[in-house]
Image (tube, grey):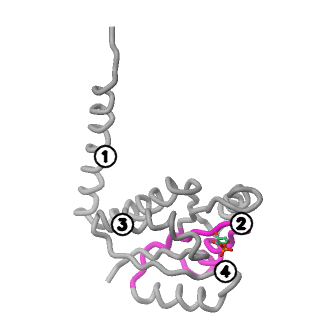
Amino acid sequence: MKFVSIIMGSKSDYGIMKNCADTLERFGVLHEMIVSSAHRSPERTHNYVKNAEAQGARVFIAAAGMAAHLAGVIASLTTKPVIGVPMKGGAMDGMDAMLSTVQMPAGMPVATVAMGKAGAINSAYLAMQILALQDDELNIKLQEDRIMKAKKVENDSNEIEIRI
Ligand code: RP5
């Protein structure tokens, strides 16, 4: 059973990370989602990642704000790809989380996406693109989604465009 694992540092991240789960759901991709913190519940995080990997987690998505170490800690526990989503908020409104997530030392990568909702959605897309390397059906769904997106741009333009 292969699946995507979403871990967020606090329940307060859920409003944004629901967009990640909803995106995976829309494509029919199996996923788990839990709250576990690098700082507040380090043992739970460690145990969950080890168990999830053994049970078939293929990609981990980690969302955290402020001094966001969650993605890096997960990267230290697994060789599966880890995608980090910096959460906005705190005194620096997410800049701290973005730098904490992206600035990993060599050999311990975290694929960091944008802050907030766009990042949450992109984390799901990136996870699916990784899975699609070995899943033709999912790859076709992602290609169809690109076609739909291009059509939407054209339709949106048709509604308002002015040409000479
Ligand atoms: C991080 O601190 C969480 O990921 C959250 O984004 C931020 C604030 O957490 P709460 O104080 O709202 O629980 O660990």
Q: Quadrant of residue 92?
A: bottom right
Q: Amino acid at mark 2?
A: Met
Query: Where's the N terminus, which quadrant?
Result: bottom left
- Span shown in magenta: 56-82
Q: Is residue 11 above or below residue 102?
A: below
Rounded to the nearest whole Å, what is the CA distance between mark 2 and mark 1? 33 Å
Secondary structure under badge 1?
A: helix
Residue at x 45%, y 72% (from the top left corner):
59
Residue at x 61%, y 61% (from the top left corner):
86
Q: Quadrant of residue 164?
A: top left
Please give the residue where the numbered disc 1 appears in the rendered image. 146
Rounded to the nearest whole Å, what is the CA distance between mark 3 and mark 2? 26 Å
Picture disc at residue 47: none
Secondary structure under badge 2?
A: loop
Picture disc at residue 38: 4
Picture disc at residue 24: 3
Q: Is residue 54 above or below residue 79?
A: below
Check disc 1: other Cα within 10 Å, few if <14, some if 14-19, many if 20+: few
**Residue labelled 2 has its Cβ within 8 Å of some atom of ligand 1:** yes
Question: Looking at this view, is 16 or 70 the one in front?
Answer: 16
Q: Earlier along the polypeptide chain: callout 1 or callout 4?
A: 4
- Mark in front: 2 vs 1: 2
**Residue labelled 4 has its Cβ within 8 Å of some atom of ligand 1:** yes
